[in-house]
Amino acid sequence: MATMLEVAKRAGVSKATVSRVLSGNGYVSQETKDRVFHAIEESGYRPNLLARNLATQKTQTLGLVVTNTLYHGVYFSELLFHAARMTEDQGRQLILADGKHSAEEEREAIQYLLDMRCDAIVIYPRFLSVEEMDEIVESHSRPIVVLNRRLRHNSSHSVFCDHKATSQVAVEQLIALGHRDIAFVTGSLDSPTGVERLSGYKEALSRHNIPLRESLIVSGKWTPASGTEAVDTLLARQETFSAIVASNDDMAVGVLRQLHHHGIRIPQQVSVIGFDDIALAPYMIPSLASVRIPVTEMIKETIGRVIFMLDGGEFKIQQRFTGELIPRDSVANGPYA
């Protein structure tokens, strides 16, 4: 394997000059740089990135921590695509670390990225509490931004969607269409997003003086299969409902399928709404009404904040986003319209 000394001999310069060219520190003429890069190409020399990073204190990398329970979903694909693209646009490399299945493993993933000397880290947490994340942000000099969770003490380091308010507005739109008996399929309730969307459903009913019927709430697991199971559960309970809100589109697809299986017409008998507005939503039969979460805008804001912090900037305010219901054929007026 070629060494820096060999590169220096080929280029007719000192080893220190090669080091300055690679690190970008100190003046080196363009002619000398060209000779050094030509010698690197000829020799096949690969710079020791770790040593260079230690010298420059920068790696041109951004770290992203996401728990692997999100990997199989459409939502994660969109999140990762935009994070990678926007990081690339900034001339940097994105490094993904798996938060796995617990708060401790999320901490280990963050520490791994710190040990890799990532210039900044974005956390999409599932298990770490708000208090723990505030402590992590305050304990490190490198910028750490939390995505999809609201921090209490370091709010400018968080970019989030208000899932409770978004869910509330979506349910209220069903109420405005004349629906009162509205069933709800939760996401996994160890997920903050799942808890907030359920809370928004309950708040909407309360604001419109509609009694909460716990029997209309069915636990889901974010999967199409749990959507089909939710319909079977509601029918087994012999519940009356004119609308079903599923906490994500995967479950809503399962709901559509199982309602059709039981001969229940959509939306004439039951309206259906999902969350996340997946790419297939407009192509379902009937097309699926869904709440669009501004993932692209959230990632753009997050990466922008990280880069601004790396350049010495400081934010004073948090960034809150809300979703928007995209109406489609799966929703119609209810019996009280």
Image (cartoon, rainbow, N blue to C red):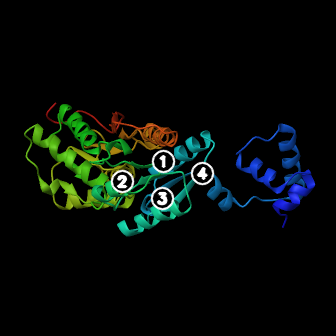
Instruction: Give whichever of discs 2 and 3 has the lower sequence position.
Output: 3
Give the spatial CA distance, label 3 vs label 1. 10 Å
Circles 3 and 1 in contact, beta carbons < 8 Å? no
Q: Earlier in the sequence, mark 4 or mark 2?
A: 4
Location of residue 230 (image quadrant): bottom left
Could you say which disc has been placed on residue 58 in the image?
A: 4
- Residue receiving disc 1: 79
Image position of 329 (left or right of 181): right
Disc ID at residue 71: 3
Answer with left or right where residue 244 lies relative to residue 4. left
Front-lying residue, 238 or 217: 217
Residues under labels 4 and 2: Cα distance?
A: 20 Å
**Amino acid identity at mark 2:** Glu
Q: Which amino acid type corresponds to the residue marked 1 in the rendered image? A: Leu
Q: Specify few, some or many for label 1: CA neighbours under 10 Å numbering under 14, 14-19, or 20 or more.
A: some
Q: Is residue 281 above or below residue 94?
A: above
Disc 4 residue crowd, few under 14, some 14–19, many 20+, Cα 10 Å: some
Work out whether residue 158 can be spotted: no
Q: Looking at the rendered structure, which numbered label has been put on residue 263?
A: none
Identify which amino acid the numbered label 3 is placed on. Tyr
Left or right: 196 in relation to 8: left
Residue 18's x, y, as percent?
80, 52
Report the disc number at residue 138. 2
The tag earlier along the polypeptide, 2 or 1, is 1
Q: Position of residue 187 (x, y in %)?
A: 30, 56
The residues bearing labels 2 and 3 have C-alpha atoms spaced at a distance of 28 Å
